[in-house]
Image (spheres, grey):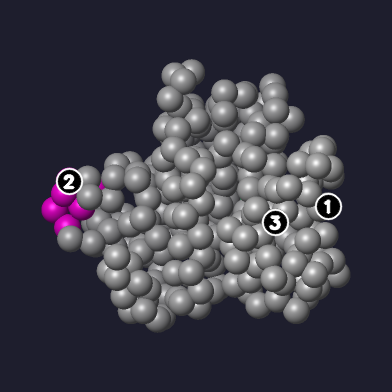
């Protein structure tokens, strides 16, 4: 694998009984890139992430993540990556700090490293002052921030985020994106994310548009718009698939946030 490549996927396929959820996809992600999968519900985004994170075995095809084969070397893959799942996965009965500590133990981190790292990642997502609070008291946005902190705890080279802002209000979504961009700037880490929000796809360096288990196009947001002669990704999606991607209420404050810088 090219040393500049962090993910290399070849003909990856996953079937569930009669249904082909991911149908022979191939793509590469470069080091330091924010790479996005954009597609409607059921497109196969989570299934792809789960295979790349070694949580689900492909039916056929191969992938290398951080230079490790996902089938032959799943344990090494897991050490190199951080994951923020689509569904909440914190322990509500523990404090913020103890959720992180538990994660550090699972990853066999040294105690000294855990102790040094916890304040760093909590500061990044501005939750240091809440470290002693039980997670059940946290808002949805705070939980997401803590999950991001946890995903970063063991110094991953690559972070997977599956619909990182799903179900959050536009203001909180914008806030979460502030952290993701800050983290990328500070650590140079590579990011693979999925979303069905057009506005989030705009932040990516490159996006793969996914529909019915296929990658129907792949380019930078600007490149896609130029190629299809459209001024928004929304129209690009409609043009390629003949369908509208689901859009959410309250997009205007998000758009304001995106334009402010
Ligand atoms: N464990 C499973 N068993 C059966 N079907 C599944 C399973 N996981 C996902 N699917 C199906 O695979 C398709 C892709 O799902 P998913 O990868 O979750 O899509 P997305 O994340 O893009 O919304 C859907 O039709 C979904 O119902
Ligand atoms: Mg999903």
Residue 87 in sight here: no
In x, y percent, where is residue 204? 37, 50
Looking at marks 1 and 3 on the same chain, the residue that comes earlier in the sequence is marked by 1
Give the residue at x 64% y 54%.
Answer: 121
Please tell me how crowded label 1 is: few (under 14), some (14-19), or many (20+) other residues with Cα within 10 Å.
some
Q: Is residue 34 above or below residue 260?
A: above
Q: Which residue is mark 1?
A: 102
Looking at marks 2 and 1 on the same chain, the residue that comes earlier in the sequence is marked by 1
Q: Which residues are magenta?
A: 224-230
Please tell me how crowded label 2 is: few (under 14), some (14-19), or many (20+) other residues with Cα within 10 Å.
few
**Which image quadrant for residue 95?**
bottom right
Looking at marks 3 and 2 on the same chain, the residue that comes earlier in the sequence is marked by 3
User: Quarter holding the C terminus?
Assistant: bottom left
Q: Which residue is mark 3?
A: 119
Q: Which residue is mark 2?
A: 227
Tag 3–tag 2 contact (CB < 8 Å): no
Magenta stretch: helix, strand or loop mostly:
helix
Q: Mark 3 vs mark 2: give the one in front.
A: 3
Residue 128, numbered circle: none
Foreground of the two, 54 or 96: 96
In x, y percent, where is residue 38? 41, 54
Give the residue at x 13% y 53%.
Answer: 229
Name the element at disc 2: helix
**Which image quadrant for residue 87?**
bottom right
Foreground of the two, 111 or 165: 111
Disc 2/disc 1 C-alpha distance (Å): 47 Å
């Amino acid at each position: 694998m090219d040393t500049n490549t962090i993910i290399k996927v070849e003909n990856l396929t996953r079937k569930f009984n009669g249904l082909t959820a991911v149908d022979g996809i191939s793509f590469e992600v470069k080091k330091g890139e924010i790479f996005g999968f954009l597609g409607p519900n059921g497109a196969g985004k989570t299934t792809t992430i789960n295979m790349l994170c070694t949580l689900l075995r492909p039916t056929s095809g191969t992938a290398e993540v951080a230079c490790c084969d996902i089938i032959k070397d799943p344990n090494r893959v897991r050490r190199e990556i951080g994951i923020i799942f689509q569904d909440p996965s914190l322990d509500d009965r523990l404090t913020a700090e103890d959720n992180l500590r538990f994660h550090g133990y699972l990853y066999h981190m040294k105690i000294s490293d855990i102790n040094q790292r916890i304040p760093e990642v909590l500061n990044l997502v501005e939750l240091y002052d809440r470290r002693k609070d039980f997670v059940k008291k946290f808002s949805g946005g705070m939980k997401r921030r803590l999950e991001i902190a946890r995903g970063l705890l063991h110094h991953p080279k690559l972070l997977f985020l599956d619909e990182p802002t799903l179900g959050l209000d536009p203001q909180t979504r914008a806030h979460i994106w502030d952290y993701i961009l800050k983290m990328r700037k500070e650590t140079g880490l590579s990011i693979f994310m999925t979303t069905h929000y057009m506005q989030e796809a705009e932040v990516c360096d490159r996006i793969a548009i996914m529909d019915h288990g296929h990658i129907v196009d792949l380019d930078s947001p600007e490149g896609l718009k130029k190629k299809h002669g459209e001024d928004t990704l929304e129209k690009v999606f409609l043009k390629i698939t003949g369908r509208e991607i689901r859009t959410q209420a309250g997009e205007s404050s998000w758009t304001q946030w995106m334009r402010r810088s």
